[in-house]
Image: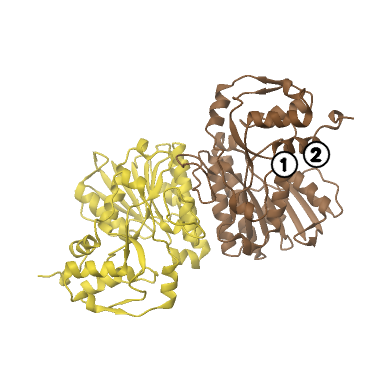
Chain colours: A brown, B yellow
């Protein structure tokens, strides 16, 4: 079993790699080799099997051809230019998110080996004038170029699977919280910061009202779902290979209450409430009323409560110096 | 007002051209020039304005660049490799239906003139495990590569419109009946043949049960809707530029009754009932329970009854020798 993670230097890619290393197998077979590829060769990880790290430019078909060969059994395709970047630089988004995905799929078609391809899509495929709730049968109506490119990725994955060129499965990821690391410029960045920074003993700003709802999943559960997704039988996927990954609809208040329930009253005192109208307006435009019946029926799971998300962050990602002694 | 029809040699392209010639204007402006482009330069048409005919390979960006210039105000983009062809030759479908559409849109983006682009999509975007009825908010879940390529065209048209690169509007066409000309190898071919051939005094075979339902539109109404579609105000289109064109859900029996109501009892006697299990199976897999609220609200129309479809064929397309004296 040879596994390839494209986007293996990213946050989800590394967590999937670590989880594979801990398991040692995938789809009931021992892993013989794991390849981590990214635009720059990623750091390696500790594993009970050989780990190769590779630099790969997904926009360059020759680079993809050199990366994927007839021995590649499972490909996790996570590489993408993110939302704000794809919106600001239309060509970069088209090249990485559309041409890049096509390069992966076309390489698989040329090989004729029908590898499993796990694709991360996004809830950004939804939006516009479409009514709530958003189900597995709701039309993608993206309001960003990133969402358009991901929606096209879903259509390609489905058809390349129907034709037998790949054995694809795609998952629209909820907003991941608590995401480790530093805040970034994404409008959703605060949705991790308001939990993460206080747990790290640092202040954080909440730029929206505490009643604001959104749709969340922990990194740990996300990785479990992606690996379960890779292990699903093709026959169980039916005539649509892409689906919304389970998540929880929560208000900011519910998240902070969970923080307090797990870590006591001190962390929440580090949250400053400073309404930022631009961020609040963007977030109000996002949808949060999602159904995910298909993924649930296939055994994928949401977190049971946001207390789990807080606890997972403390167990998996809290900087060691900050871990309670 | 300069108008370009890509796919101007096809059946719908020529009918749109003839309708524009009869009107002389589009979007409240006189037409200064009409260009008909196809893979081979199409025959010209009679018109009160200059008509240019051009050969163009839409899979070749340079050929598209030479075709579309900054003076092009409205583009009807009808060029496509059809369903059976795209299914048999995956690469041809990808090149014409996906790369070709991207070439048109990318040329418009490069020009920066935001022309109106009228795109013909297909009900083949729908299918799979999605429940009826199929509304404007139903997920495309194509079960053919042609449907996948058309669904991608819709997503591209929407996003290029949102970004202001084109002013797009896309319409998923019902099955057109009564289609003029000869039968072809499409599974839907009989849906015109069983009306057209008897009106031409020739025998026809109906390969499915008379109770089989499907979703139909006449060529005349289709062309009217496409021209109305070109004339819609961008503001009225909302956040989704693509929609199902109105049509009628009819059984074969209802179509034949309409034939008899318009043309008397003789034509229907020329229909032979010969169940063809392969065709019947394909057609049973098609959907017919469509809603088209958005297009109706925008003023597009279905035929009032199938008697209209029969009458339009007799008025517009019946070979002259067969027209009652």
Judged from the image, the secondary structure of the residue bearing numbered disc 2 is helix
Do marks 2 and 1 share a chain? yes
Q: Is residue B288 above or below residue A22?
A: below
Dividing the image into 4 quarters, which one contains the N terminus of chain A?
bottom right
User: Could you tell me how far apart the alpha carbons at marks 2 and 1 are, in whole angstroms?
Assistant: 9 Å
Q: Residue furthest left?
A: B325
Dividing the image into 4 quarters, which one contains the C terminus of chain A?
top right
Asked whether, in this view, residue B219 is left or right of residue A156, the answer is: left
Q: Quadrant of residue A204?
A: top right
Please give the name of the residue rendered at 68% of the width and 61% of the height, measured from the top-left corner.
A115
Asked whether, in this view, residue B224 is left or right of residue A208, the answer is: left
> Do the residues under discs 2 and 1 have CB atoms within 8 angstroms?
yes
Q: Quadrant of residue B208?
A: bottom left
Please give the name of the residue rendered at 52% of the width and 33% of the height, measured from the top-left corner.
A285
* Residue A260 place in picture, x, y as percent: 74, 28
Asked whether, in this view, residue A294 is left or right of residue B262, the answer is: right
Judged from the image, the secondary structure of the residue bearing numbered disc 1 is helix
The answer, for residue A35, to whether it is visible in the render is yes
* Residue A7 place in picture, x, y as percent: 70, 46
Q: Residue furthest right?
A: A325
Of the numbered discs in the image, which one, if any, rests on residue A316? Answer: 2
* Residue A247 place in picture, x, y as percent: 64, 43
Of the numbered discs in the image, which one, if any, rests on residue B321? Answer: none
Q: Is residue A134 above or below residue B14?
A: above
The answer, for residue B203, to whether it is visible in the render is no
Which of these two is toward me, A259 or A94? A259
Residue that label 1 marks: A219
Chain of the residue under label 1: A
Which of these two is toward me, B121 or B256? B256
């Amino acid at each position: 079993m040879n596994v390839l993670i494209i986007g293996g230097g990213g946050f989800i890619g590394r967590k999937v790699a670590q989880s594979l290393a801990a398991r040692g197998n995938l789809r009931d077979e021992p892993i013989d080799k794991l390849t981590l590829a990214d635009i720059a060769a990623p750091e390696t990880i500790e594993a009970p099997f050989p780990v190769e790290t590779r630099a790969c430019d997904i926009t360059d078909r020759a680079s993809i051809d050199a990366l994927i060969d007839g021995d590649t059994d499972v490909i996790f395709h996570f590489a993408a230019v993110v939302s704000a970047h794809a919106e600001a630089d239309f060509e970069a988004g088209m090249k990485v998110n559309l041409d890049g995905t096509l390069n992966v799929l076309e390489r698989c078609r040329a090989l004729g080996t029908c590898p499993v391809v796990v694709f991360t899509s996004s809830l950004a495929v939804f939006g516009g004038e479409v009514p709530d709730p958003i189900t597995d049968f709701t039309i993608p109506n993206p309001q960003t170029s990133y969402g358009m490119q991901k929606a096209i990725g879903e259509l390609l994955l489905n058809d390349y699977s129907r034709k037998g060129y790949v054995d694809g499965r795609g998952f629209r990821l909820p907003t991941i919280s608590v995401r480790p690391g530093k805040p970034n410029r994404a409008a959703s960045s605060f949705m991790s910061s308001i939990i993460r920074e206080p747990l790290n003993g640092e202040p954080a700003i909440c730029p929206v009202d505490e009643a604001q709802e959104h749709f969340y999943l922990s990194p740990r559960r996300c990785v479990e779902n992606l690996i379960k997704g890779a292990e699903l039988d093709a026959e169980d996927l039916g005539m649509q290979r892409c689906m919304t990954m389970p998540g929880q609809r929560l208000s900011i208040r519910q998240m902070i209450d969970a923080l307090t329930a797990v870590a006591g009253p001190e962390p929440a005192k580090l949250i400053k409430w400073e309404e930022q109208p631009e961020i609040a307006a963007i977030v109000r435009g996002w949808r949060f009323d999602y159904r995910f019946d298909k993924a649930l029926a296939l055994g994928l799971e949401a977190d049971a409560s946001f207390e789990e998300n807080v606890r997972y962050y403390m167990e998996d990602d809290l900087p060691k110096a900050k871990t309670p002694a």
